[in-house]
Image (cartoon, rainbow, N blue to C red):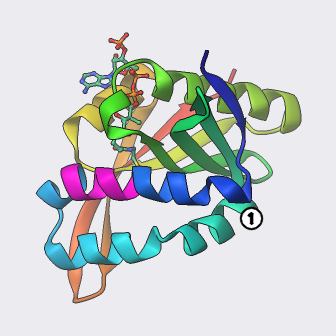
Amino acid sequence: MLKIRRFRPADAEECSRIEREIQRRLFSRIYPKKVTAHFLRGSSPRRMKKKFLRRITFVAEQDGNIRGFLVMIAKKRVAKISSLFVRFDQRRTGIGRKLMDFAVSFLRKNFPKVRKVWLRSSLLQPTITFYKAMGFNKIARKTISFPGKIRLVFILMEKNLP
Ligand SMILES: CC(C)(COP(=O)(O)OP(=O)(O)OC[C@H]1O[C@@H](n2cnc3c(N)ncnc32)[C@H](O)[C@@H]1OP(=O)(O)O)[C@@H](O)C(=O)NCCC(=O)NCCS
């Protein structure tokens, strides 16, 4: 059975493998090589461990293997999802939805003042479709600068918590 739990330092290697596989197989199709290289550097186990421990990070685990993870930051009234990845061969099996539901329940219980969840989506259509299915609405397009003077467009999305 799939279990959602807090991230532990020993999970960093597996989370890094999941994120890097998605970057190579999906993000490299829409981002220039320099940007993919930049993302791959940022997703080393060491860097991910540091970031994930500072933030609120959940992993989805089944049969001792990590199948996906979600990372967020909760402030006073707003929470931001900074990463959500499901293992490439496990997509569309309900893991993303379970991670998202778990994160929202966690916020309701532990951060009752949070009224909004915010995120920045890539332009990958399945990702936008997923977030819409999770109740997020597009609020703006945002251009972000990357090394090599590359500017890319992302979609800002938000969801109100009842
Ligand atoms: C986007 C992502 C997190 C979704 O997680 P997932 O586990 O594959 O999604 P789920 O199986 O929980 O899907 C929930 C619902 O979202 C929608 N959805 C998800 N993937 C979809 C797709 N490829 N096409 C159309 N709708 C999709 C469907 O409505 C689905 O419900 P259904 O299967 O009952 O029809 C995952 O596919 C992923 O890691 N993608 C690559 C990385 C990424 O883009 N991360 C987010 C930004 S960093």
Answer above or below: position of 61 versus 162: below
What's the residue type where badge 1 is placed? Arg
> What residue lies at 45% left-to-right and 30% top-to-bottom?
136
Q: Which quarter of the image is occupied by the C terminus? A: top right
Give the SS element for disc 1.
helix
> What residue lies at 27% left-to-right and 76% top-to-bottom?
37
**Residue assigned mark 1:** 54
Residue 98 horizontal side relative to residue 131, left or right: right
Magenta stretch, overall SS: helix
- Residue 23 part of the magenta segment: yes
Q: Quadrant of ligand 1?
A: top left
Residue ranking furthest to the top: 1
Q: Is mark 1 within 8 Å of ligand 1?
A: no
Residue 85 horizontal side relative to residue 45, left or right: left
In which image quadrant can residue 9 be found? Answer: bottom right
Q: Point out the stretch of residues depicted in magenta.
A: 19-25
> What residue lies at 59% left-to-right and 74% top-to-bottom?
46
Q: Is residue 135 visible?
A: no
Answer above or below: position of 14 versus 109: below
Answer above or below: position of 103 versus 43: above
Q: In this orientation, which residue lies closer to the viewer: 16 or 127?
A: 16
In which image quadrant can residue 41 be found? Answer: bottom left
What is the x, y in percent for residue 15?
Answer: 52, 52
Q: How many labels sit on residues? A: 1
Answer above or below: position of 113 versus 133: below
What is the x, y in percent for residue 53?
Answer: 73, 61
> What residue lies at 42% left-to-right and 55% top-to-bottom?
17
Q: Which quarter of the image is occupied by the N terminus? A: top right
Q: In this orientation, which residue lies closer to the viewer: 86 or 108?
A: 86
Q: What is the crowding at mark 1: few (fewer than 14 residues within 10 Å), some, or many (at least 20)? A: few
Q: In this orientation, which residue lies closer to the viewer: 126 or 153?
A: 126
